[in-house]
Structure formats: C-alpha cells, structure tokens
Image: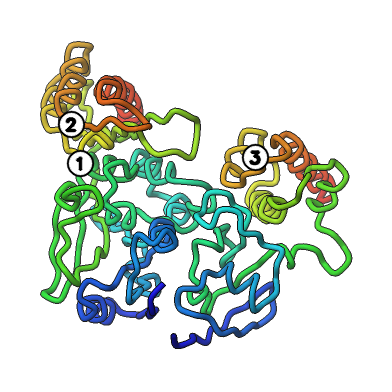
Amino acid sequence: MTDMRYLAPSTLDEAVGAFAAAAGAARILAGGTDLLVQMRAGMVQPGLIVDIKKIPELTSIEETADGGFVVGAAVSGAVLYEHPRFGEVWPGVLEAINLIGSTQVQGRASAGGNLCNGSPAGDSVPAMIAAGATVTVQGPNGRRQMPVEAVPVGPGRTNLTPGEILVSFTLPPRAKGSSDAYLRMIPRTEMDIAVVGCGVNLTLKDGVCTAARVGLGAVAPTVLLVEDAAKALIGSKLDDAAIEAAAAACRAACRPIDDKRGTIVYRTKVAGVLLKRTVAIAADRAGRA
Amino acid sequence: MAKLHISTKINGEPTEFLCDPNDSMLDVLRGPLALTGSKEGCGSGDCGACSVMLDGRLVCSCLMLAAEAEGHEIETIEGMAEGEKLHPLQQKFLEMAALQCGICTPGVLVASKALLEKNQNPTETEVRYWLAGNLCRCTGYDKIVRAVLDTAAEMREAAR
C-alpha cells in the first residue's frame, strides 16, 4: 500500500476542503465496511482517508417539526434501529438498512456509504428511493439537494462531483395511512447480496391507494425508480389486476445481468414476485398507520 | 510513512500507541499491543473472529482503522474475565465444550456478551441471528447456541 494520510475533521468545511484538495486520491470513510475491504483487496489505494464520523451533522438523526426525518450519511444501521421513532414511521427503510451484513457490520455500516458505494444491489437504496428521500451533498461550490435515484449512475459510480460529500438523507413527512416495506431475494436466509431487492412506499385512503413509489434493486446497472409500477397502483384498491399490472411494470423495467447469483430470466421473474409481496406488507402496515 | 499517535482506552485502561494510517485496529491489537485474543480469520468482516466492542457496540476490528480509536473505548476478549474469574459465558463454553479449534471463540464470546447485555432472555432464533456474523467451521453452532442460552438462563436466575 502506498503512503496514506488519515484525517478526522470536526467540521464539514474542513472535510470538503481536504477532500477537494486531494483531487480524486481521497476516499470518504463512514463505517468502512466497504472501503476497508476494497483497500485490503487492492481495489483502491487512497492517498487520503477523510473520516467523517467526528462531524455532528453526519452522525445525527433529527425528526423535523413537519414530521420528516434528516438522517446523517454516516449514521450506522444499529444507531438508526435504536431510534425511538424512525422505525415506526419508516419501517421499510429501516428493515432495508438492517438487512445489510451481520450484527458487527450493522455497528458501522451506513446508508450513506451504501449509496455512495454505488452497488446496484445495495439494500437501502430501493427503500430510500421508494420513500422519496432526497440527499444533501456539500462540495467546494456549496450545498445542493437531489433525489436518491439521481445519485447512482452505474456500478460503483455516482453523480457526486469531485470534492462533494454526502451529508444527509431527508425523508418527507408522512400522510396518514402511509407506510413502506422492503424485501429482497437471496438464496439463503441471511448475510447475502440481493438477487433482486424491492422497496414499496404507499398511502391508502378509504382502501384506495392515493400515492405510491416503487424502487427496484439488482436488476439494472443502477437501482431503479419504477414509475409505471407506481402508476398501476395509484387510484386502485390494490386489487389483483392493479398489482399484476405493477408487477408487469417491474418486470418490464428490468435490465439485469446473468451472474452466479441469478440469471436474467430468474431476476426478471422474481422482480414481479417481490413487488406483489412487498405491496402486501406495505399495504398491511399502511392500513394500521 | 508518518506514524499517528493515538490515545484510547482499552479494557478500561488508558492506552496510547503509534500506528500507520492504514493499520487496522486488529493489526494494532495483535501487534504492538500484544492482545492476541482477537483473531484474524478473513480480514474482510465476514467471519467475526476479530469482534471487539467500540464504545459499547459490537464491531469487526479488521474493518476499523486503528486511527479511529482516538478518543474512543475498546473492549476485547482480554477484558472479559475478571482476573482469574471467568465470565459466565466463558465458564459455560468450557463446561459444554462449545468450542473445538478455538479460533472463532473469542469473537463468539465477545458477540454473545454483547447480546446478553441487550437481551437477558433471547430466543434460540435471536441468538442464531445475532451470531450470524461469527463463523465457526468446527462445532456446527449447536453447542455454541446452547451454551449461550444456558448462560442466559443462569444469569437470569443469579440476578433474581
């Protein structure tokens, strides 16, 4: 390994300054559960590590006055799990994040790292997209916001420009009768990478679906927002025809690869199956919300 | 490479060490600090043999830079027994032969202690999920899980 420096700044301005000055040779360290593995495997050899966990905004969870949440990019899965309210309001987002790795990994891994790692199979990403979450990023030219689905551009690549750091996720306030769910297909019961992942977020009013968003993972070079699936659900009573139309929209959105975890045909079929199961869970929760 | 000077607390003792920026916590525990109880199985966070507590939270020390320990508290397997007195989990693992080669055992014990501190009455399913990140290639897990459940029952009884 080449010479590497380690910095743990206590302000975001300092972190952005150091990250930008390193001009591409630096990596951001949140939980490190991807980065340290990549360093050890020789996939990346950063000249500078910028540890963002000493910056309060990156490690805090705030419930805003309007009922939304702002979750720091480096908040670990275990810390989010222990929040008294987050899992009640966003059970699907929480279960997606908590599916990542073991107890040990949950102690460190963050949704921010999961998104910036750029894997099409990251579990938290479809759930965040379904939630309609936006991210705040800060770089040398200031702050900007974008929807989560705008962040990944391909395997391992994001829309963040040089020097930009993911600061936080903002989850919108919830209408009454809203809930969400996340399911993934893996060939075992725990600790694996999604063959397909599906996040569904919906609102029910008098049994009618008035709002919906669907995120689909591991079936394309990036995690997808499947607007046609949401359209099929909105306005329906989530009857069989509407759910089958949404499942067909998910299958149609798939552009997967064949690999050791699943074939193109299998992933495409499972995308529809997962949509149906995830809608059922989200609808059940929304009926009680 | 410039060495970093790190001040931390390990098993309750204020501790200082020098490390390279890319050293893992496990490298420093096993090297300069000579705390070789934590084992390196995979080095990629899959096996849990290097499990330690960081500020009371279970983590893999192979997935943590040693530099990150600055200002934080680490607990390792070496801090589990009180002098000659074994922790009830350690005693039970011996009684029930919940180990064979022993490489995974320190990590399993640290992780099991973390579980019992959060949940005094775990179900078998909860134990198995909690320990899913601790791989053992010898025991088939049943003895480990039984030892954890038995310890939990004894510790509940002792606390009454």
Q: State how far apart marks 3 and 1 are (Cα).
A: 36 Å
Q: Kindly identify the residue that appears in the image at 64 percent across and 79 percent down.
A: B32
Image: A191 above or below A78: above
Chain letter for the residue marked with disc 2 in the picture = A
Q: Residues within 10 Å of mark 2 (few under 14, many from 20)?
A: some
Amino acid, disc 1: Pro
**Residue pointed to by mark 2:** A255
Residue A289 in view here: no
> Reading the chain from its start, which is encountered first: label 1 or label 2?
1
Q: Are marks 1 and 2 in contact (CB under 8 Å)?
A: yes
**Residue pointed to by mark 1:** A221
Left or right of residue B11: residue A229:
left
Under circle 3, the secondary element is: helix
Quadrant of the drawing holding the N terminus of chain A: bottom left
Chain letter for the residue marked with disc 3 in the picture = B
- Pinpoint residue A246: horizontal percent, then vertical percent: 18, 22
Q: Kindly identify the residue that appears in the image at 30 percent across and 20 percent down.
A: A273
Under circle 2, the secondary element is: loop
Left or right of residue B48: residue A125:
left
Amino acid, disc 2: Arg
Say if labels 1 and 2 share a chain. Answer: yes
**Residue pointed to by mark 3:** B127
Q: Kindly identify the residue that appears in the image at 58 percent across and 57 percent down.
A: B58
- Pinpoint residue A74: horizontal percent, then vertical percent: 36, 62
**Mark 3 or 2, closer to the camera:** 2
Say if labels 3 and 2 share a chain. Answer: no
